[in-house]
Image (cartoon, rainbow, N blue to C red):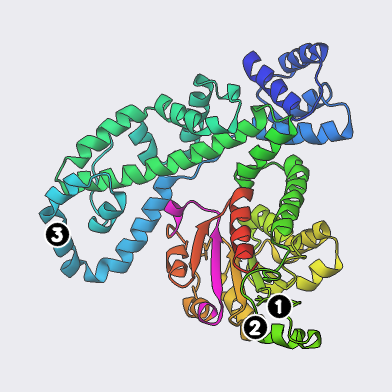
Amino acid sequence: MERTLANFIRALRMADVRVSTSETLDAFRTAEITGWRDRTALKEALALTLPKTADEKDAYDACFEQFFRFDDFRSEAAEADSQQDESEQESSPQSGDGEPGAEGQAQGDGGGGQSSGSDVEELEELIQPGEMSEARSELGQMLMGGDASQLSLAIANAARETKLEEIKVFTQKGLFTRRIMEAMGLAELQQELEELGASNTLPEQRLNAELRRRRDGLREQIRDYVERQFLLHADARGDRLREEMLRKVKLSNVEVRNFRHLRMLVQKMAKQLATAHSRRRKVTKRGQLNVPKMLRRNMRHGGEMVELAWKSTKIDRPKVYAICDVSGSMTTYARFMLMLLYSLEEVLPNVRAFAFSSDLGEVTDLFRREDIDDAIAMTLKDFGGGSTDYGQAFEDFERLAGRDLDHRSTLIILGDARNNYGQAQTELLRGFRDRSKRVIWLNPEPEMAWGSGDSEMRRYQAHVHQANVCNSLVHLERVVSGLLRAVS
C-alpha cells in the first residue's frame, strides 16, 4: 500500500498539486490511521493533508477519483448471451428448416475455415448461434466468464506488475497495452486460438470466433485504461508535450481538469486552420489570361496591351449542418466538435448546429448570442440526458431543415449510432445524402464495435458519403481540415 500511496502523490504532482516531503510523510501517517477500507474517509483525510488552495483541491478530487477508480469493464459474456437469446428467439420458427443447412455448410467448409482461422468476420458469418466448447486457457475462461470485477482486478494487477506508473511518453501506450495483455496470459490464449483454428468441429469454431472477438474488445479496453493512467502519471508539465498528448488522447478519457487546456488547444487549432484556409480560391494576377476583358480594359490605351486581365474562379463557402448526439456517452465529443466549428466562423460562417438525445432542436442562435462555453453548457443541459433516438432526431431535422439542404450543403453527424433498438429511419438519412453535396458521419467508437448490440452504424454507413472513427482532436482536425480544403 505504501507504493500505491507514493504513486498517488506522484500523480498529484503531475496534476500541479505541490506536495512537499514532510506532507508526503504526513499523508503516510494519515493513511496508516485511517486505513484503506473506507474510500470516502481516506479521501477526506488525505484532503486535509495534501491540497492547499482551491485549485489544488479541485485537482486533488479529480486525481483521487481517477487514481482509485475501479473500472467496470463491459461484460462481453452478458451482452453476447442476451444477443444470442434474442437471435434464437427471432429464428426459432424457422429453426427446423434453417439450422441443418447452416450447420452442413459450416462443416462442409471446414477446410476453408482452417486456412482463414484469423478472419473473425468470416467465421462470425459462417457460424450460427449454438453449442460452444469450453475455454481452456486462464484468460479465455476469464473472458468467457463475463465477471467484470474479476477482469478489472486482473487488469489492475497486470498493470502493477508491468509498472505502468512508469509510463513516460504517449508513444509507449501500445507497448504497455501489450505488456499488460501478456501478463494476463495472452501467450496461452493465442496458443489455444491456434488449436481451435485448426479444428473442424463446429463448437470449437464457435469458441474460436467468440474468443477472438472478446480478445479484441479486451485490447481496446486496456488501451483506454493505459491512456487514463498515462494522463495521471506522465510528466506533462511541458506545454509542447501536454499539447501533443491532448491532441491524440481519446476525448472520453480526458478529465475535467484538463478541459481548460483542451479549450486553448482547440482555439489554437482553429486559428491555424483559419489562417491556412481563409483566402478563397480566386486566381488573380496569375493563371490564364481573360482576353475579352483585357481588350475592353485596354481600349483607353489605343489598343496597346498595357493592363492585363486574368481569369478568376470564385467558389462559394459551403453551408454546414452539424447534428450532434449530446447523450451521456457523447457529451465530451459534442462539446469540442461544436467548439471547433464555431471557432472557424471566419472560414465557415454558414454553420447551423442541432443537438439531440431524443428530440432534436436547433442551437444555432444560442451560439450566436452567447459565449461559446455558455452556449455549450446550455445545449448540454437542454438536450442531454434523454434516451437516444436517432430515428426521432432525423424526423425532427427533416422538419426543421430538410428542405434547406442543397448541392452546397455538407451535413456532419456526430454520434455513436446506438439507437436503443428504436426505428433507424435510414430512408430519411438516404434523402439527406441525395440532396446534399456530402454527408459525413463521425463515430467515436472503434470500427470493430460498429453494428454490435444496439448500434445501427453498419446500416447508416451505407447511406452516407463518408464514415470515420473520430474520438480525438487529431481526428476532428483532420475532418474539418478536409472540409475546408474542399472549398478553399
Instruction: Looking at the image, tell me whether mark 1 or mark 3 is earlier in sequence order.
Output: 3
Q: Residue 57 placed where, x, y %?
A: 83, 32
Query: The disc labelled 2 sits on which kind of residue?
Result: Val
- Residue 42 appears anywhere in the view: no
Q: Secondary structure at mark 3?
A: helix
Q: Which residue is mark 3?
A: 105
| Residue at 50% across, 81% down | 434
* Figure quadrant of residue 66: top right
Q: Which residues are drawn in magenta?
A: 432-450
Q: Please tell me in which quadrant of the rendered image residue 342 appears.
A: bottom right
- Above or below, 243 against 263 in this view is above
For the residues marked 1 and 3, what is the alpha-carbon distance in whole angstroms?
72 Å
Q: Name the kind of residue labelled 3 in the image.
A: Gln
Q: Which mark is residue 291?
A: 2
- Mark carried by residue 115: none
> Observer-nearest residue: 286 or 433?
286
Image quarter in which the C terminus is found = bottom right
Direction from residue 197 to residue 28 in the image, left or right:
right
Q: Nearer the viewer, residue 277 or 259?
A: 277
Point 71% across, 73% down: residue: 352
- Residue ID for mark 1: 309
Gap in Å between the C-alphas at discs 2 and 3? 71 Å
